[in-house]
Image: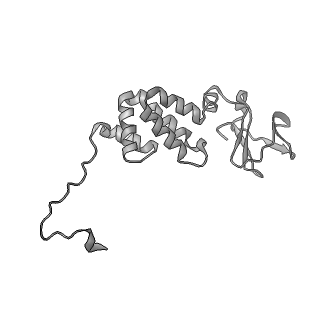
């Protein structure tokens, strides 16, 4: 795969291979304990077998320098990054991480949201996260739309004013 991993289909688990073999055809040999990856009959990787479905077993040295940065991603990594910006951003990122059963599925969204600090500025990102918290909406697309349209600084919609009472108004007791 493009991310430098091959899938052992029996377990639906992914194992890393050296990045120079991305796009090449490899063969996987495995036992109940070991997974070995070959390219042109040459062993290029060996891992202890992990039956966890949709998990990743990665040797950092197998990854390109770009992917090595991604390998350092974890919920704590994104929470610490968000904490350095503001408590609102941290709260927002924590909610994004909680949206999926597997936090790994949210890493790209978290990285994208936090990258708006450089694209739009720290203060605008903080305001957009506060707006997301206000509307209870936690995803990359929401923050992107708010920042693109400049809505991060607009006040929230005012609550509906209370209607004045008069003799033609029925109260809640009429609807029980």
Residue under the point 14% across and 60% down? 164
Residue under the point 44% across and 27% down? 85
Residue under the point 51% across and 34% down? 111
Q: How many marks?
A: 0
Where residue 62 sits in the image (x, y, percent)? Answer: 72, 30
15 or 106, which lies in front?
106
Looking at the image, residue 157 sits to the left or right of residue 27; the answer is left
- Compared with 90, 165 (above or below) is below
Could you tell me which quadrant the N terminus lies in? top right
Whether residue 121 is visible: no
Could you tell me which quadrant the C terminus lies in? bottom left
- Compared with 28, 83 (above or below) is above
Outermost residue to the front: 173
Where residue 20 sits in the image (x, y, percent)? Answer: 71, 30
Residue under the point 20% across and 57% down? 162
112 or 81, which lies in front?
81
Looking at the image, residue 66 sits to the left or right of residue 166; the answer is right
The scheme the figure's colours follow is one colour
Looking at the image, residue 111 sits to the left or right of residue 43; the answer is left
């Amino acid at each position: 795969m493009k991310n430098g991993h091959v899938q052992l289909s029996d377990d639906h688990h992914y194992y890393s291979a050296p990045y120079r073999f991305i796009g090449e055809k490899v063969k996987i040999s495995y036992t109940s304990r070991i997974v070995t990856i070959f390219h042109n009959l040459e062993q290029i990787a060996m891992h202890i077998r992990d039956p966890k479905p949709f998990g990743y077993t990665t040797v950092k040295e197998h990854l390109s320098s770009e992917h090595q940065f991604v390998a350092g991603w974890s919920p704590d990594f994104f929470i610490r990054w968000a904490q350095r910006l503001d408590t609102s951003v941290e709260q927002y990122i924590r909610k994004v991480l909680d949206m999926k059963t597997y936090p790994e599925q949210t890493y790209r969204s978290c990285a994208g949201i936090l990258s708006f600090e450089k694209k739009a500025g720290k203060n605008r990102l903080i305001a957009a996260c506060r707006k997301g918290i206000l509307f209870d909406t936690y995803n990359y697309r929401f923050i992107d739309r708010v920042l693109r349209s400049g809505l991060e600084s607009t006040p929230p919609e005012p609550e509906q004013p209370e209607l004045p009472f008069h003799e033609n108004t029925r109260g809640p007791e009429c609807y029980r």
